[in-house]
Image: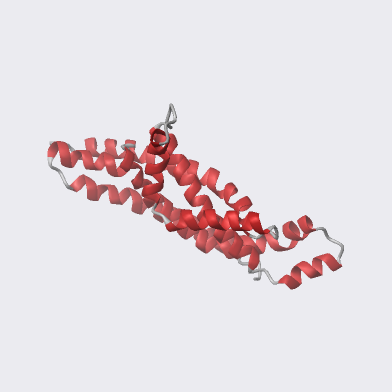
Amino acid sequence: MATFVTVSLKLLEGFGTTFFIFLITLLLAIPLGLPIALCSMSRFQPLRWLSRGFVWIIRGTPLMLQVIIVFYGPDLIGMPTSLPRMSAVVVAFVINYAAYFSEIYRGGIESIPKGQYEAGQVLGLRKGQIFFRITFLQVIKRIIPPMSNEIITLVKDTSLARIIAVRELIMEASTFIKTQALLWPLFYSGAFYLLFCGLLTILFNRLEKRLDYIKV
């Protein structure tokens, strides 16, 4: 029978994979979402339609299906090589969350009153200066709540990596069901998610309080 220490060590190993997927997804999807948002707001209609069509497809299909397509897709279309399992998971997650983040960015940018842009132009500021000097911090304050929700959702979505046999936290816990008929490690894995999400919640709450001086 597995001891508590043995189970804990295996779950920590799985959590390392979970955290890696979470961190790489954030580092790549957060900046990638901004150009997608800007394309969605472009005055050039083909670019705007293309960007919004991409976001519609990504948001309208399950992340699990996207992981499967990225991993198995190259074989289905006859490509000689396919991505490694971890790489396929990261690519699918980055594409998915970049699409979601782009809509959050777009909503935040479009929520700023147009009068502020016009006032900046009257003062002789260029578009870039108006954005970074006047609207940037306001946009950040507005998007923190929805961004925090998506980031906490990402923590739990990492469990979908097991669909292509990436040994993340839930998959490590599930091995004890198969090998030793133990169910409690699966419930124990929930404590890792709760603790991590709790730390993120505290972090975002503190960030919101630090930005209280910005009036939106």
Q: Position of residue 142 (x, y in %)?
A: 59, 65
The residue lying furthest to the top in this view is: 80
Residue 152: x and y in percent read: 43, 55
Q: In percent of the image, x 75 and y 73: which residue is there?
A: 115
Q: Which residue is drawn at 44% across and 58% down?
A: 60
Please say which color scheme the image uses.
secondary structure
Q: In which quarter of the image is residue 209?
A: bottom right
Asked whether 72 or 210 is in front, the reply is 72
Above or below, 191 against 106 in this view is: above
Q: In this view, does 90 lie above or below 196?
A: above
Residue 38 seen in this snapshot: no
Please provide percent x and percent y for residue 79.
44, 30
Residue at 37%, 48% in the rendered image:
65
Q: In this view, does 188 lie to the left or right of 195?
A: left
Please state which of residues 199 and 120 is positioned toward the viewer in this rendering: 120
Q: Quadrant of the N terminus?
A: top left
Q: Quadrant of the C terminus?
A: bottom right
Say left or right for 68 vs 170: right
Residue 112 in sight here: yes
User: What number of labels is visible?
Assistant: 0
Question: Where is residue 78, by image quadrant?
Answer: top left
Query: Looking at the picture, does residue 80 appear above or below residue 93?
Result: above
136 displayed left or right of 5? right
Q: x, y (%) of residue 20? A: 43, 39
Residue found at the far front of this picture: 78
Compared to residue 190, the image places residue 176 above or below, namely above
- Residue beneath the point at 28% across and 41% down: 171
